[in-house]
Image (cartoon, grey):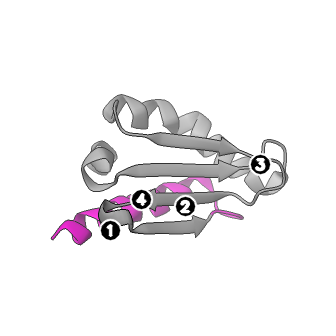
Amino acid sequence: MAWRGKLSRNLKELRVLFCQKSPASAQTREFVERNYKDLKTLNPKFPILIRECSQVQPQLWARYDKGVERGFNLEGLTEAQITKVLKELVEAGEALKA
């Protein structure tokens, strides 16, 4: 879980998009409810943007240095799979710095 504390070192911004009501966004909403506090506590000044919009597909976007962005569609993913995607994004940010 050490990667959670590296969000602010390896990324510039994290955005989570989902619908407030759709079943497709249920796991993403659950992920945010269970993990936001921990991620923010470990990275207090890091911008974690939560965007709720009607009828939008659940997505996770990471912005790195020099405006580089990577995004993933989270539809159909479980909370554990979303955590894995986020971990991969953080590790990709570390690789981009090398």
* Dot 2: element: helix
Residue labelled with disc 1: 92
As measured in the structure, the alpha-carbon distance from the residue carrying label 2 to the one carrying label 1 is 16 Å
As measured in the structure, the alpha-carbon distance from the residue carrying label 2 to the one carrying label 3 is 18 Å
As measured in the structure, the alpha-carbon distance from the residue carrying label 3 to the one carrying label 1 is 27 Å
Q: Residue at x 15, y 71 (%)?
A: 98
Q: Residue at x 78, y 57 (%)?
A: 24
* Dot 3: element: loop
* Dot 4: element: strand
User: Which mark is drawn over residue 63?
Assistant: 4
Estimate how packed mark 3 is, as few (under 14), some (14 to 19) or many (20 or more) residues with alpha carbons within 10 Å. many
Residue 31: x and y, percent?
59, 44
Which residue type carries mark 3? Cys
Which residue type carries mark 4? Arg
Foreground disc of the pair 2, 3:
3
Residue 74: x and y, percent?
64, 62
As measured in the structure, the alpha-carbon distance from the residue carrying label 4 to the one carrying label 1 is 11 Å
Residue 80: x and y, percent?
54, 55
The answer to which image quadrant residue 63 occupies is bottom left
Asked if 56 appears above or below 43 in the picture, the reply is below
User: Which mark is drawn over residue 19?
Assistant: 3
Residue labelled with disc 2: 81
- Mark 2 or mark 3: which comes first in sequence? 3
- Mark 3 or mark 4: which comes first in sequence? 3
Residue that sits furthest to the left in the current view: 98
Residue 68 visible in rendering: yes
